Image: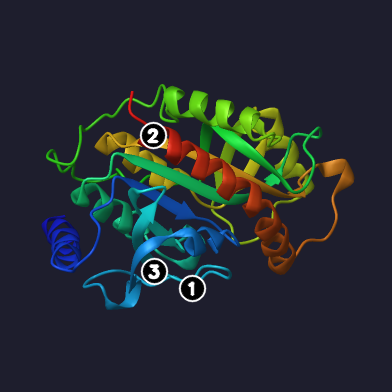
Amino acid sequence: MDQYKQRVKEAALWLKEKPLVIPKIGIVLGSGLGGMREDLEEVETFSYNEIPGHPTSTAPGHKGEFVFGKLAGVPVVLMNGRHHFYEGYSMKEITFPIRILQLLGIQYLMVTNAAGGLNPDFEVGMPMMITDHINMMGDNPLVGFNIDEWGPRFPDMSSVYDPELIDIAREVAHRLSIPIYEGVYVGVSGPNFETPAELRMLRHMGADAVGMSTIPEVIVCAHSGIKVLGISAITDRAVPDDLQPLTAEEVIEIAQKTGLSISALLMGVIQQLASPV
């Protein structure tokens, strides 16, 4: 654990020594959702590969870089690509970049992903705001020795998706006429898509969307006190009685189209956070 802690600190220090904008907000760009990078100003980009101790990303649609800059005048950092359990990484490696952002002092994390719609009322190509989650990944990034300076041994999870950020996102969606669902996200390990029986089980448990990411990052945010807003792009119908064969390429294509709405929504939230109270 001391070695992991030191690796995170060295990576954060390496970035702090660079001429970059120190971010207030972190944004995790899920599969096919890298378009927000084009709206950044004062851009500084660092590949994960060049940051000391940082794992690489191998998932389709994930470039693997930190992009620092400003959106609506607000200092932000984009995680353009994330790590997944199905790639063979441990939970602590998956959340390594979130720990870096924690040490850089971010206050908010906006996390996006591509997800299958378990709720039969959900249409493909629509965003869903995450109001809660179910961890079915079989592991947890907080297992093991706790680093007390990073957070408590038993963090509270009663409102990990910040109610204030959810309210702001609702208002922005209404103002911009962006249709958006709300629901519960369930995380599974992957990499295979789910069987009809598994989908029935997950829906019976109360989930509205299913994906293979996000939850480890959000747990670490709860541990570290970072406020979270989560948005899923509903890329396919994960409804057992209406299940069609699915490929990763199809998921990415739909996520890219849905990403336009998600980008506009997140930009509106950032502008609201930047406004004086």
| Labelled pair 1, 3 in contact (Cβ < 8 Å) | no
Type of amino acid at the residue the image marks with label 2: Leu
Which quarter of the figure has residue 88?
A: bottom left
In this view, the mark in front (3 or 2): 2
Residue 83 drawn above or below residue 57: above
Q: In front here: 154 or 51?
A: 51
- Mark 2 = which residue? 273
Percent from the top left, x then y, of residue 73?
Answer: 36, 48
Please tell me which residue is depicted at 32% across the width and 52% down the height of the picture: 98
Residue in view at x 43 percent, y 23 percent: 164
- Mark 2 and mark 1: Cα distance apart in space: 33 Å
| The image quarter in which residue 154 lies | top left
Please indicate, yes or no, whether residue 163 appears anywhere in the rendered image.
yes
Earlier residue among tags 3 and 2: 3
Pointer 3 residue: 65
Tag 3 or tag 1, which sits nearer the N-term? 1
Left or right for 276, reference 235: left
Indicate the quadrant where residue 80 lies. Answer: bottom left
- Placement of the C terminus among the 4 image quadrants: top left
Residue type, label 1: Thr
The secondary element bearing badge 1 is classed as loop
Q: For the point 12% across and 60% down, which residue is it?
A: 6
Q: Residue placed farthest to the right in the image?
A: 242
The amino acid type, in three-letter code, at marker 3 is Glu
Q: Nearer the viewer, mark 2 or mark 1?
A: 2
Foreground residue among 102 and 23: 23
In this rendering, would 111 be left or right of 97?
A: right
Point out the tag, 2 or 1, that comes first from the N-terminus. Answer: 1
Can you identify the residue that label 1 sits on? Answer: 58
User: Mark 3: which secondary structure?
Assistant: strand
Quadrant the N terminus occupies: bottom left
